[in-house]
Amino acid sequence: MKHLLIVYSTQTGRTRQLVMAAREGALELADEVEVRTLRAGDAGLDDLLWADGLLIGSPENFGYLSGAVKDFLDRTYYPAEGKTIGLAYAMLVSTGNDGSGAVRALDRIAAGYQWKRVSEPLVHKGELDDEALAAARELGQTLAAGIAFGVF
């Protein structure tokens, strides 16, 4: 059984909605992939080391990742150093701007961990619609399938 960790932060609830849609998609492969979904403040080193894949959900706050997501990454970086090399990751961003600051920040941090981004980030600006939720479900399903079948 493979493991997908979903870590997220939310203030308005939009990021949580995107994450839950992605989780739904990932759970379509529940026979092959166990999914653990945690708020960033509740996720820790053991969760990260458990994972074969990682989905980060963050609002873009002040042109950056949410503080809670950054805190998760800060808390786990040194203890996980060298132990998660090549980890497949993807990202969801809910934003009122363009999301590029949050994406750039995670890409830089992931480079330090030596993770591998396996999908273009899903960035959604403003209120959510059915199309955004469908894209999030597809991202979750794709990430889980890639992990399950050894593509990533």
Image (cartoon, helix red, strand yellow):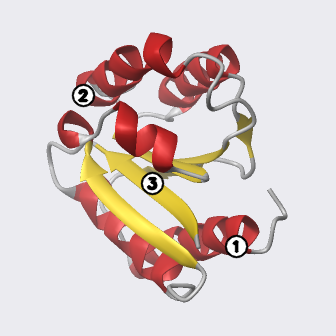
Give the x, y percent position of residue 105.
Answer: 53, 19
- Describe residue 78's horizontal placement relative to residue 127 as left or right: right
Crowding near the residue tagged with mark 2, few <14, some 14–19, many ≥20 C-alpha atoms within 10 Å: some
In the rendered image, the vertical position of residue 113 relative to residue 122, given as above or below: above
Mark 1 to mark 3 CA distance (whole Å): 13 Å
Secondary structure at numbered mark 3? strand
Q: Look at label 2 and name its amino acid.
A: Ala
Q: Earlier in the sequence, mark 1 or mark 3?
A: 3
Q: Give how far across and how far down residue 2 sits, in percent.
A: 60, 67
Image quarter (top left, top right, bottom left or bottom right) of the C terminus: bottom right
Q: How far apart are marks 1 and 2 (CA)?
A: 28 Å
Classify 10 Å Cα crowding around label 1: few (below 14), some (14-19), many (20 and above): many
Q: Which residue is drawn at 53% across and 62% down?
A: 3
Where residue 73 appears, as percent x and y from the top left, is 41, 23
Q: Which of marks 3 and 2 is in front?
A: 3
Q: Mark 2 points at which residue?
A: 68
Left or right of residue 116, residue 56 in this image: left
Residue drawn at point x = 28 percent, y = 66 percent: 17
Read off the residue under disc 3. Answer: 5
Query: What amino acid does circle 3 point to?
Result: Leu
What's the residue type where badge 1 is placed? Answer: Ala
In the depicted view, which residue is nearer to us: 39 or 94? 39
**N-terminal of the two: label 3 or label 2?**
3
Q: Is mark 1 on a helix, strand or loop?
A: helix
What is the crowding at mark 3: few (fewer than 14 residues within 10 Å), some, or many (at least 20)? many
Residue under numbered circle 1: 148
